Image (cartoon, rainbow, N blue to C red):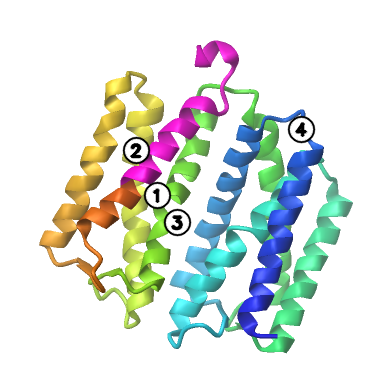
Amino acid sequence: MASIYWYCLLAIIGVGIAAFTIYKKRDIKLSTFLVFFIFSTCVTWIGEFVVLGLLDGYAYKTGIYTSPWAQNILGHLILNSTFYPGTAILVAAYSLGYGWISLITAIYLLIEYLFMNLGIYEHHWWKYYMTGVAIFIYQLFTKVWFKKLDKIPHGWLRTSTFYFVGFVILHYPIPIILLLGKQHYNVNWAQDMYLSSTMFIFFYQLVETLILVFFVCVLEKWYWKFVPFIISFVGQSLLVKLNILVFQDGWNLFYTMLVYFFGLSIFILLERYSLQTEETIN
């Protein structure tokens, strides 16, 4: 079996676990599950960016690209956007205890061992016990966060949650566009173009998401919600003018802004109709 199929198999399992849990727990709002899934995804992304992107702790070998960092990005997108949040939903929705969390952690370790032996994943300085500790803490952390989500329609918890959600919605299309060879960021922060581009846009959008959340979640007047659209257009246009944002293969700023505006619109709708009481919505 080709390397990429193993990664896709885990993705299918992760999505299947999430779908099964959501179906069985129909007393919980679908929008709450959606927000939590995206939130859990972002938690893994931040950890992955530090350990994989900045510290080169391990490597994914998907067999699709010649660049090792393109393979890392693809492996990261597949696993951290499906399998990890899928198990997080299972643990959180059923409020599983330490025994079940330990079992799930052990399964993660077995999968990692299998991938190592198949030659489709490798450790650099990373160790198995680090995976065990990270997964166990991740499951506990997301479980505790989930318990609080629907109880506080306002305040720092809700705003913090939507910061994570906003970052994923803004950032997710960018590495895909990068992997498709449509655009990259010319900053030379690393020797590999894929790694350099990812590092730049990751930090850039961490700041950009702060602005998004402030105008959408903190300021309540409807007209403030137009500001992130203006800021995103000005920001991307400036990057083009500075020759940082480079387009390829017929791609251009118009297409990038379409992707951006679509993501911003999705975020505004999700924020409007999620994690709120009926009184708040009305």
The first of marks 2 and 4 along the sequence is 4
Q: Residue at x 71, y 87 (%)?
A: 118
Q: CA distance from mark 2 to mark 3?
A: 15 Å
Q: CA distance from mark 2 to mark 4?
A: 31 Å
Q: CA distance from mark 3 to mark 4?
A: 28 Å
Pick the front one: 22 or 99: 22
Tag 2 residue: 212
Q: Percent position (x, y) of residue 91?
A: 77, 47
Which residue is tagged 1?
A: 170
Give the magenta range: 261-282
For marks 4 and 1, the one nearer the N-term is: 4
- Residue 183 locus on image (x, y percent): 28, 68
Badge 3 crowding class, 10 Å Cα cut-off, few under 14, some 14 to 19, many 20 or more, is some
Q: Find numbered disc 3 in the image and state the secondary structure of the residue it sits on.
A: loop
Which one is earlier in the sequence, the residue at label 3 or at label 4? 4
Mark 2 element type = helix
Q: CA distance from mark 4 to mark 1?
A: 28 Å
- Above or below, comparing residue 27 to residue 66 in the picture: above
Q: Say whether marks 3 and 1 touch (CB < 8 Å).
A: yes
* Labelled disc at residue 172: 3
Q: Are marks 4 and 1 in contact (CB under 8 Å)?
A: no
Q: Is residue 121 visible?
A: no
Residue 26: which numbered mark, if any? 4
| Residue 246 located left or right of residue 131 | left
Looking at marks 2 and 3 on the same chain, the residue that comes earlier in the sequence is marked by 3
Q: Tag 1: residue type?
A: Leu
Residue 197 or residue 174, whichever sits in front: 174
Label 2 close to label 1 by CB (< 8 Å): yes
| Residue 250 visible in rendering | yes
Q: Residue at x 28, y 56 (%)?
A: 256
Q: Quadrant of residue 166?
A: top left
